[in-house]
Image (spheres, rainbow, N blue to C red):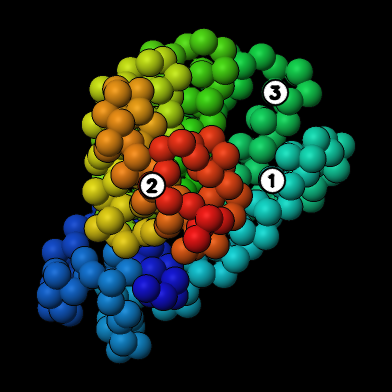
Amino acid sequence: MSSFPLSIGNQIKRIRKEKKMTQKELCDGICSQAEISKIENGRNSPTIDLLQEIAKRLRVPMSLLFQDRFESEAYREIDNLLSRLLREQKYEFLQLELEKIKISDTKAIYLLKSYFKILLLFKTNRIDYRSASSLLINLTNEEDVWYEAPQIFIRIKMAISNLYTENGKFHLAEKVYLELESLEYDTKDLKRHLLKIYYNHAQLLTFHKKYEEGMVLTKKGLQDSLKLNDSSFVAHFYYQRGYYNEILENITLAKQDYTIAYTLFHTLQLETYKEIVYRGKKIFLLFSFDEL
């Protein structure tokens, strides 16, 4: 799927919801509701004539429907820079870069800046984890955040869960994952984010030895990743399922899962993960590429 129709679809959906308009109201006399749904989900690319009609119905200039694509590129550039500075603990430079970002009416960039400002305060010990969690929660509670900027919404929620986990608040961390899993993931890109949520939630359950629950979640993640044909996640979920089978003493199944994960990582040339499986689970592998 091209990111271009997806970005247009996201923008149409955002504006439609902002104007409290249903898909039926938007498409009336223009096209079918099924067509609008496919456009909003990035499955169909609208013609210029149809875009003109949609823009007219939404009462916005047609150029606004393309705006999301360019904002996404700006968002990625800013995110990559700020993430690198935070990862490298270059906090003074991070502060300077945050100050350079102008106040914008773009919800995603505004949230990204706010998110990093809170993390910077926490990392430099100017606020504790409770205050950081509260501030992050306030960001996600702003109106229409899920619809306008779902990716940063998920990211903020995951950060909240991580803060809870690091400070021994397992029940609160799990509550965040359950909330995320209850939302509607209506595009392929968002469904990939849901796979990561399943994977991380299962790891949280593993840490607290809730193996049966983790197995159920892992199987769901594996099933969904197979539907999406996302090979990378398929490999990770096979490895995770192998771990649960090992813990639950289903050794034959563990061997199968670990070997499938190992083979997929090899095929995808994900050498780091392949090496992790080989070194940590060699005794379970049915064969090794190094020995062929």
Residue at screen point 28% across, 56% down: 226
Residue position for label 2: 286
Asked if residue 247 lies left or right of residue 27, the reply is right
- According to the picture, the residue beneath numbered tag 1 turns out to be 83
Of residues 139 and 217, the one drawn nearer to the viewer in this rendering = 217
Name of the residue lying farthest toward the front: 291
The three-letter amino acid code for the residue at tag 1 is Ser
Question: Visible in this render: residue 16?
Answer: no
Q: Position of residue 193 (x, y in %)?
A: 41, 48
> Which residue bears the numbered disc 3?
122
Residue type for callout 3? Phe
Q: Nearer the viewer, mark 3 or mark 1?
A: 1
- Sequence-wise first label, 2 or 1: 1
In front: 99, or 83? 83
Secondary structure at numbered mark 1: helix
In this picture, residue 105 sits left or right of residue 256: right
Q: Position of residue 50 (x, y in %)?
A: 27, 84
**Distance (Cα) linking label 3 and label 2:** 46 Å
Relative to 62, 99 lies left or right:
right
Quadrant position of residue 290: bottom right
Q: Percent position (x, y) of residue 119?
A: 67, 30
Is label 3 in a helix, a strand or a loop? Answer: helix
